[in-house]
Amino acid sequence: MINLIPCRLGLLIAGSFALIAAGSSSAFAQAGFSPLDKSNPAASKQDTNLKPHATPPMAAPTDKLPVDKLKLPAGFKAEVWSSGHPGARTMVEGPKGTIFMGTRQLGRVYAITNKDGKREVKVLLQGLTQPNGLAVKDGALYVLAINKVFRFDNIEDNLDKPGTGVELTDKFNLPDTVHHNWKYADFGPDGKLYIQVGANCNICEINNGIHGQIRRYNPDGSGMEIVARGVRNTVGFDWHPVTKELWFTDNGRDWAGNGGPEDELNVVAKGKEGSFFGFPYCHANGVPDPDVKIPNPCAGVTLPAVTTGPHSAGLGIRFYTGNMFPKSYQNVAFIARRGSWNREQKFGYDVIVARTSGGKAKLEPFLSGFLDEKGNAFSGRPVYVHQMKDGSLLVSDEQNGAIYRITYQAKSAGKTASR
Amino acid sequence: MGLVRKYWRPPVLGLAVALLSGEAFAQGTPLAERIQACNACHGEDGNSKMENIPSLAGQPEFFILNQLVLMRENVRQVEAMVPFVKDLKDDDIRALAAHFAKLEPKASAEPVDPALVKRGEEIASAKRCVSCHAANLGGQEQIPRVAKQRIDYLTKSLKEFGDGTRQGADTNMSVPVAGLSDADLAALAHYAASR
């Protein structure tokens, strides 16, 4: 049904990346976590056996995908759109309709195309370090893997032969620390490339000149500006379709209790570029950090528009502007919550809606069913959302290596409500 | 030769030498033949007798599967492993992982220093190794067994996590090793190997 075509050329290209990386000793990405980390798991009184969940490096068979468990509001329906691409995370669309998909530890970038009504999956690139950052502009695909930046011009004409791309790593000059630096990147309404640089620890004093930021650049890597500071780990942002303000999700720290501090949905208000969002001193809606203490930790801190739940891992966010969903969904934000690990009772594993107004937001459920609350178990992990040209919504599932497509049909509301 | 691990020593056994000298596996190689090739370096029963080569016996199945995929994908770069992993299909990897996970782990013949074990136990307690590596240090899911692993391999790996040269690894391991001296790392290795 769905063909996975390994691209041998992709492998060769990836090999050349690896050789470049290994050729100079300074190119080794640093391990990640800052030695200044102040995590104090003992003080958190959380279960000592909590650990990050394993992400399968192989995709679930299509007939084992949990699509039948999914629940949506009346009139909405979920179906499997594509599968067989392990590590499924970032989704961006080329002008000709190719969905490019980034991964983290697997190091692959996929190209998913439509052929005779079915999806064809190619491994476009391989062997990169956590290529989570993908962006499309003027027919070119930008690939960001920690500090490495490549641009593949006219990519959709070269899916079988992407070449090595134009390397822009030196121009962007991003830090090579790995932890919390699997990139998220997107072009803003101003034509600039916005890039996240996360905190290289769970909780620590960071170098504010380097880490805990959202930056923006000209597409060639010049003209860097800091848009937001004191941001622990945002892995998703989008611009409100009307106000053009930047909204971003942010993951709260671990090992400070099962209850939080909660994750955040933030907004950079017009004219407030460069605002400080609190890390590491002040979390959520004004929670002082228990391990990194300063006087008046929340003074001067821009608090979130809304908190998005403890350890819920809100990642991808997209404002809806399509024609398929009911009018009440126009300009609301869909947020994928990958789900908790640092919490005894699991939480999240869903897609929620944020209705924004005047710098605040209200949340409501949208897609659920991956989490079995009684069994404290999960069957999928939504990571990113993407609006298709027809107004349907794609949701990537990293756990199963699949994409689901959400559609809406008013007439069949009653029949599909329980799916 | 930037890719060649400086700690890696060429294996002395003929089969592995033959395979390393350029003969990659053809696709469709029987599982038994692949296992035999693994055993040449990793030990006849999956317990390595070779310096700096890890034991695979009793590793969590998911751990072996995950690492073989990451090596195949050129994310975790181990030059010596390239000929053995580059053509592996997912099913080959599943079968190899299932095989080695079932074998009984046995400590190597390396001498264990009781004083280092004691010191290592204190450090391991402070660093909460069991949180991920499980109470018996036998590993779980994507986290490896360190109990009964070779001391030299554990020491080498801990150093690589500390200096950032272990590619394709989860970044979490750089936290517990931060600030530890070489003597501390050796103590941790002796402790884990003795469990």
Image (cartoon, coloured by chain):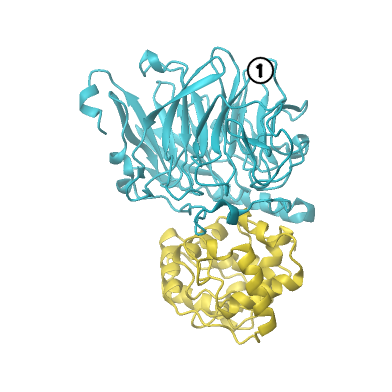
Chain colours: A cyan, B yellow
- Could you say which quadrant of the image residue A1 lies in? top left
Residue nearer the viewer, B176 or A11: B176
**Amino acid of disc 1:** Asp
| Total marks placed | 1
Name, please, the residue furthest toward the front: A295
The residue carrying mark 1 is A190
Where in the figure is residue B22, as x and y percent of width and height?
Answer: 61, 69
The vertical placement of A301 against B119, above or below, is above
For image coordinates 27% across by 18% down, the residue present is A410
For image coordinates 44% across by 21% down, the residue present is A389
Residue nearer the viewer, A248 or B77: A248
**Can the viewer see residue A19?**
yes
Where in the figure is residue A81, as x and y percent of width and height?
Answer: 37, 35
Question: Quick check: A62 left or right of A128?
Answer: left
Chain name for mark 1: A
Name, please, the residue furthest toward the left: A415
Residue nearer the viewer, B123 or B76: B123
The vertical placement of A176 against B175, above or below, is above
Quick one: label 1, few (<14), some, or many (20+) residues within 10 Å? few
At mark 1, the secondary structure is loop
For image coordinates 27% across by 34% down, the residue present is A419
The vertical placement of A190 against A45, above or below, is above
Residue nearer the viewer, A1 or A377: A377
For image coordinates 61% across by 78% down, the residue present is B150
Quarter of the figure with the N terminus of chain B: bottom right
Where in the figure is residue A164, as x and y percent of width and height?
Answer: 66, 42
Question: Quick check: A411 left or right of B23?
Answer: left
Quarter of the figure with the C terminus of chain B: bottom right
**Can the viewer see residue A91?**
no
Where in the figure is residue B189, as x and y percent of width and height?
Answer: 65, 74
